[in-house]
Amino acid sequence: MDCTHQDFEDGVRVIRLTGRMDIEGNERIALPLTVAARSSGGAVVVDLAGVDFLASVGIGTLVSLAQSVQLHKGRLVLCGANEQVRRALERMNMATLIPLYREVVEARTAIATPSAE
Amino acid sequence: MKSERVFRVLRNELSELRPLSAWVRDIAKGLGLSASTCHDIDLCLHEAVSNIIRHGCRNEVEHRVVVRFETVSAGISIQVEDDARPFNPLAVPLPPEAAALEDARTSGYGLPLMRGLANELSYECVDGRNLLTLVFHPGQGL
């Protein structure tokens, strides 16, 4: 599993996850994911388009990450989840806790201008 | 759907999980199941077996986990049998859903996922062995 990030002019950091976010994958990216989020300016989009499997440990990591960003007065949203990953998130009521968008551009717009939601 | 009845024996090591996933996905795809059903079977099995390995097998004794995949009249039956400490995942009350992010749990999503994705779940303890059976109904919203 891989974790990369890109900063944009609107101040948003997009973190892209790729691979299978099971126990093994989660262990591999938990630290780089946390570092990438915590070293951002506080506006974080986690792009799940490359994630083909999201286990419960991955959901826990995303919750913990969003809480950590929020604790530091930032905001984290998700985007790009495929049908199966989206369904797992929705079953756990995640969409009401961490906003989930279809596309990166949509997520960036929302998080850069939260009043426009 | 053609009939299938196979099993796999695992050691209580987390390194068994990915080969287990590849095994069950190959079988499910071979039966022509939808991508969603293949995913749900894979995810529920990952949660069930990882729970056993991480929480049921805490001592140094080597355990065996047997996974049985079988086509049944209702669809697909996955039975997970282990000799770890007795644990009925269906007896655990589901935690209340968090209303706000700061109140959300950072673990404990495995059992709710299994209960939410499998169409039928049953548990029994036979001669000290845990038997968890998950049934998936292909074509019913999967």
Image (cartoon, coloured by chain):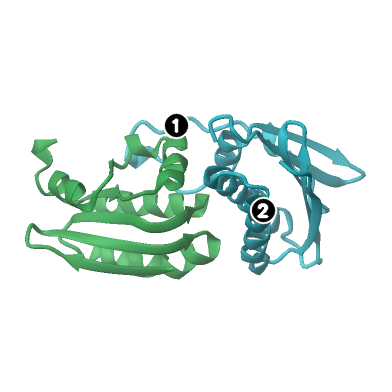
Q: Is residue B50 above or below residue B44?
A: below
The disc at residue B30 is 2
User: Could you tell whether B27 is left or right of B140 in the image?
Assistant: right
Q: Is residue B85 visible?
A: yes
What amino acid is at disc 1?
Glu
A22 horizontally vs A11: left or right: right
Circle number at residue B37: none
Count of labels in the image = 2
Classify mark 2: helix, strand or loop: helix
Tell me the chain of label 1. Answer: B
Viewer-proximal residue among A17 and A65: A17
Q: Chain of mark 2?
A: B
Instruction: Tell me the quarter of the picture where residue B27 sits.
Output: bottom right
Asked where in the image residue B90 lies, by quadrant, the reply is top right
Q: Position of residue A42 (x, y in %)?
A: 18, 56
| Left or right position of A13 against A54 | left
Element on which disc 1 rests:
loop
Compared to residue B112, the image places residue B69 above or below, namely below
Residue A81 lies, in percent from the top left, at 36, 49
Q: Residues within 10 Å of mark 2 (few under 14, many from 20)?
A: few
Q: Are marks 1 and 2 on the same chain?
A: yes
Q: Nearer the viewer, residue B8 or A34?
A: B8
Please name the color used to draw chain A.
green
Quarter the N terminus of chain A occupies: bottom left
User: Tell me, what hue is chain B?
Assistant: cyan
Check the image and name the residue furthest to the left: A9
Q: Amino acid at mark 2?
A: Gly
The residue wearing badge 1 is: B97
Q: Position of residue A85 (x, y in %)?
A: 44, 47
At horizontal 85% and vertical 47% (from top left) the residue drawn is B129
Contact (Cβ within 8 Å) of mark 1 with mark 2: no
* Left or right relative to A18: residue B22: right
